[in-house]
Amino acid sequence: MSITLEVWLMDADPNIASFGRFTLDRSNRQLMYDGAPVELGSRYFDALALLVERRGELVTKDEFMDRVWRGIPVTDEALTQCIRSLRKALGDEAGAPRFIQTVPKHGYRFVATIAEEGESETVVAAPAQPASRLAGTCTVGGLVAGLLGGFAYGVLAGTGGAAGSLMLAAMIGALGTLAGAALGLAMAAMLAWRKTADPMLVMAGAVGGLLAGLVGNMLAYQGVGLLTGRSLGDVTGPLEGLLIGSATGFLAWLALGGRARGLVLGCAVLSGIATGILIRLTNGTLLAGSLLSLQLEMPRMQLDLARLGLRLGDAGWAIPAHLWATVIEATVFVVAMAFAALSARHRQ
């Protein structure tokens, strides 16, 4: 994946430079976005002009102090705040810079170059995160989500004390790790093939989730049947995996495409809620329903999900309790995957 920026001189005027959808007019001291002015303080404009003038080169802190503050003694925090404000105005991020790159302990660099007189020259502003890093962070994200879910149900519905809660957390953590690994590997393979973060990550996430759901469903039925001779009822399967995988792929596309962290996390929460509701509307089930099926077949389990209002009756699932449980579970997992994708981007 590479995020590319085109920057060129307009009308051969050395005082006007364009980068992305921004235009910097130094003679009129204006920054414009699609022709609309962007408000910048005087010193902040000078700092941006200096960065553009020295594009591709390191601009040290001392140079900022000499050229922007003109010898006026200020703290390093003033420069940090200046760069932070410039990034906000440009819609840039320190973790995935498209315009301003931090050179730790030294200064900053404007990462786009200028192509003379409209010649198209593309410059890599944020190199692709290695696919293996995405696979690794998703695996860790799945582990964390599984541990949280297992421990929560162990504490809220367990009757076996602390040891039982920890054991359930470990078991569900292992399942979460497998799910996260499947999603991460599928998306990493797509990223390695396509060389860029594009909407195909949604399809990759869907395929990874589908495979994880199939394997998990098979292990639940065959594994429990082999060990106990009993057959489980409803457990998580390919449909649930497909829906959660699609949401995860969408968030990975946003995160690796350089979208703002707040936007990615906001979309993660909304996607998790929508996915949980959709799973319930299609009569699907996640962890709560799977545990309940296991409890019904093994009454001596040290787990009492009726404490949470989860039970089977003549009319099927107790809709309100199972709905909120499914929504919370889907949201926790999807948000964990969003953090995983953001971590893969940030650790560039």
Image: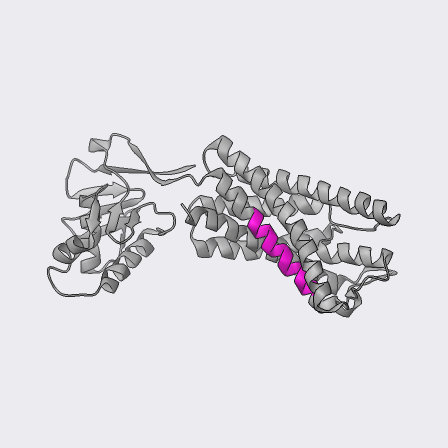
Q: Bounds of the magenta span? A: 139-154
- Using the rendered image of the protein, determine whether residue 238 is visible from the camera's viewpoint: no
Quadrant occupied by the N terminus: top left
Residue occupying the point 72% across, 41% down = 215
Its colouring scheme is: one colour
* Magenta stretch: includes residue 143: yes
Magenta highlight on residue 190: no
- Answer left or right for 300 relative to 266: right
309 with respect to 254 (left or right)? right
Which sits in the foreground, 322 or 33?
Answer: 322
Tell me what residue is drawn at x 10 percent, y 61 percent: 71
Q: Is residue 126 above or below residue 281?
A: above
Q: Nearer the viewer, residue 236 or 297?
A: 297
Q: Position of residue 116 (x, y in %)?
A: 20, 32
The residue lying toward the viewer, choosing from 41 and 212, is 212
The image quadrant that residue 83 belongs to is bottom left
**Magenta segment, principal secondary structure?**
helix
Q: Residue 269, position in %: x, y?
A: 56, 57
- Between residue 10 and residue 152, name the one nearer to us: 152
Q: Residue at x 29, y 48 (%)?
A: 100
The picture places residue 160, in percent across and down from the top left corner, at: 76, 67
The quarter of the rendered structure image containing the C terminus is top left
